[in-house]
Image (cartoon, rainbow, N blue to C red):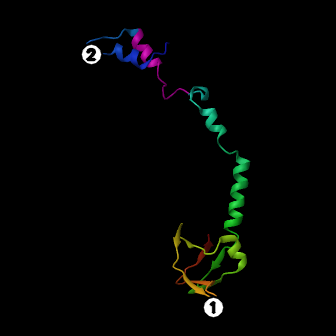
């Protein structure tokens, strides 16, 4: 069972040449069979790639932090034609000066047209959006 280089194998199978039985066997022994388990040590840089990954605990903590921030202000709307969201300083501090609104509908996020209402100072006072009676979860992001 001898592992051979590709160039060696190619030379055995050149036009007009006939490999020996041992060369033929060595050819097959030079490759992995689907029924063989490939040892992790035989995969180049696999350990280094795993070292680059976040451990599960760190990933879960990050995901929880993002979820706590992103879903801190879910607004459940049921059967409302128009919904008004006052733009408070608290929301501005969390989401920035303007929000993008999406509706979770039929398994996907869809953008919702927004009408901005501004105060006398020209700053956002509230956002209005029409949902046409859709039961939805509004996400501020």
Please indicate whether residue 3 sits to the left or right of residue 20 in the image. right
The reply to whether the magenta stretch includes residue 121 is: no
- The residue positioned 41% from the left and 20% from the top of the image is 6
Give the image location of residue 76, x and y in percent. 64, 77
**Eye-nearest disc, 1 or 2:** 1
- The residue positioned 64% from the left and 33% from the top of the image is 47
Q: Residues within 10 Å of mark 2 (few under 14, many from 20)?
A: few
Q: Give whichever of 47, 77 is nearer the camera.
A: 47
Q: Earlier in the sequence, mark 1 or mark 2?
A: 2
Give the image location of residue 102, x and y in percent. 56, 72
Q: Quadrant of residue 127?
A: bottom right
Q: Find numbered disc 1 in the image and state the secondary structure of the residue it sits on.
A: loop
Q: Quadrant of residue 50?
A: top right
Residue at the bottom extreme? 120
Asked whether residue 59 is in view, the answer is yes
The circle on residue 120 is 1
Q: Give whichever of 115, 5 is nearer the camera.
A: 115
Q: Quadrant of the C terminus?
A: bottom right
Q: Which segment is the magenta one?
A: 22-37
| Disc 1 to disc 2, C-alpha distance | 87 Å
Q: How many marks?
A: 2
Q: Quadrant of residue 8?
A: top left
- The residue positioned 47% from the left and 19% from the top of the image is 30
Which residue is labeled 2 in the image?
Answer: 15
Residue at the front extreme? 121
């Amino acid at each position: 069972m001898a592992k051979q280089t590709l160039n060696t194998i190619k030379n055995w199978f050149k036009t007009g040449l006939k490999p020996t039985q041992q060369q033929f066997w060595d050819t097959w022994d030079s490759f992995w069979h689907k029924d063989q388990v490939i040892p992790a040590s035989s995969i180049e840089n696999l350990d280094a790639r795993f070292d680059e990954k976040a451990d599960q605990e760190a990933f879960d903590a990050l995901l929880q932090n993002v979820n706590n921030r992103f879903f801190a202000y879910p607004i459940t709307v049921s059967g409302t034609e128009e919904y008004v969201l006052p733009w408070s300083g608290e929301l501005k501090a969390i989401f920035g000066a303007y929000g993008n609104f999406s509706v979770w509908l039929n398994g996907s996020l869809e953008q919702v047209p927004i009408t901005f209402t501004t105060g006398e100072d020209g700053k956002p006072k509230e956002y209005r959006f029409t949902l046409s009676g859709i039961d939805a979860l509004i996400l501020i992001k």
